[in-house]
Image (cartoon, helix red, strand yellow):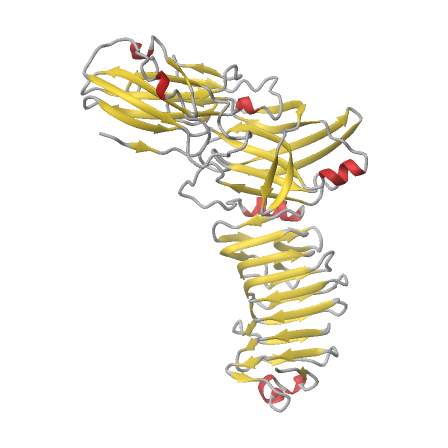
Amino acid sequence: MKKIFSIFAASLMLFAASCSSEKLDEPNGDGNVTFSVQLPSGLNSRAIGDGTTATKLYVAAYEAGTKTPLAVANGEQSIADMNNRTATVTLQLVTGKTYDLVFWAQADGAPYTFTPNGRTVDMNYSGATANAEKRDAFFYIWNDFRVTGPMDETVTLKRPFAQLNFATSDWDAAQASGLNVATTSVEVKQLLPTLDLMTGNAKGDAVNVTFTDAALPGEGITIGGNAYKYLALNYLLMDATRTTVDVKLTAKESASDLRELTVSSVPVQRNYRTNIYGALLTSTTNFNVTINPEFATPDIESHLTWDIATINSITSAGGDVTFAQNISTEATENTTPTAKTAINQVGGVIDGNGYELAVSGAWGTWDCAIHTKGGTIKNLTISGAFRGIFTWGLTEDLVVDNVVINPGAYTFNADSSGGRSVTFTNSTLNGWTSYTSGFSSFSFINCKFGSNGYYAYLRPYSPTTLTNCTFSVGYELDARCTDGIVLKNCKVGETLITADNITSLLGSDAASVTIQND
């Protein structure tokens, strides 16, 4: 009988064939079981995170449901050397009996304490140094393993950790300005200190952990096709369910010359990488946070599953977020106008990933689903709020792509421009669209304009170009508030808009529009 059990990702493949002849003690029986132990596929081929540091494999066997190890593994445990991230271990078990089996692999001299009698691993965070690849480790728990005779089994280990990375794009610029970072440290709030090898869960009293100053990791990382330099890489004991932690990076050239970055509610999850990246040395206000299954492909999406409070925290700081599910939320007070909003965006990317942001409790005159200061909003449906996307003034250009807006009244609305540009592409705006004067440019490309049941109306106060756009029948365009509204190859329904039919199709207030059809 051969079964392959896959368990998250990591790096290490234990005790090689050269060690497969090792015999383990007592008791004798006809249930000779050979385990081929390996690390998951898809590990990094580089030195960081490749699993090769985990060279010691510990194996313990138990009567099912107990914490006292049996003698089948050299008394308390079997220890095997890993070779090429694999190992082979043979246990002499009894046919017809059921066992619990524990596999733990770590670096030689790693700070962890594996305790077979009690089935735990202590993380020993006290005095932990940053950027220590020897803290990488892997495990597997096989409860209720029933022996049916001689058996060959394959076991794939997984990390019990989240990998938390800080990476910067401005290393050369920082050096050119005279900042030569030599060491980094990382503080993480409220980590659990013990891995329970009965349940596989983290447990114990949460502690604040400081991974103390150490030299930077020696490699770079590619994120979104762009190259970054590692500032820090640390392993955090986590459960399989996603949670958040508060973290702080300190980068030092000397005790008096340092850079600090504090990030709240960072998403972390066992066997996943979380990357905090951006121009971290020259700017501590603009950064991105992503989480992805670098080490395996669990049956959940690799996007951020943060709650709305976490999303708001990250977007308020200019970070990127990607939805993993529909979000229904109550709007809260916005500190920028005294109005209610769900998400405050200050640059960065909000990627809805095809999901919906449904906002309730946002029916005041100035309430909105997203209040933006600029950045990108894409792949999202917005519904429920009085205003879909609103700005009191942009501090950078705004791009809206593949977004459907179904508001109570306004789709996009602006009370101040900031002198920036706005571009809508491939989007649907159902309702009243109106925005102030002063935008450097404003354009709609391949967009649809329709009704929300009450409004079907576009009134620009800034010059605007609409290209290959479609209006629903009965829609009105008010061109009286600005010169320079241009329509290129636009339609009402299936009818091409021309200089001859524009007022009959879009109303008499559209008379001053310029038509530039091909």
- Position of the C terminus, as image quadrant, is bottom right
Relative vertical location of residue 73 with respect to residue 264 in this rendering, above or below: above
Name the residue located 63 percent from the left edge and 55 percent from the top edge.
340
Q: Residue 200: x and y, percent?
A: 40, 27
Please state if 178 lies on the left or on the right of 202 as rendered.
right
Name the residue located 57 percent from the left edge and 33 percent from the top edge.
164
- Position of the N terminus, as image quadrant, is top left
Please state if 18 lies on the left or on the right of 178 as rendered.
left
Q: Residue 495: x and y, percent?
A: 53, 85
Residue 141 sits in which quadrant? Answer: top left
- Number of marks in the rendered image: 0
Residue 264 sits in which quadrant? Answer: top right
Q: Can you see residue 66?
A: no
Extreme residue toward the bottom, this view: 500
Viewer-closest of 206 and 402: 402
Residue 241 sits in which quadrant? Answer: top left
Q: Residue 121: x and y, percent?
A: 45, 19
Q: Residue 55: x and y, percent?
A: 46, 19
Relative vertical location of residue 287 with respect to residue 129 in this rendering, above or below: below
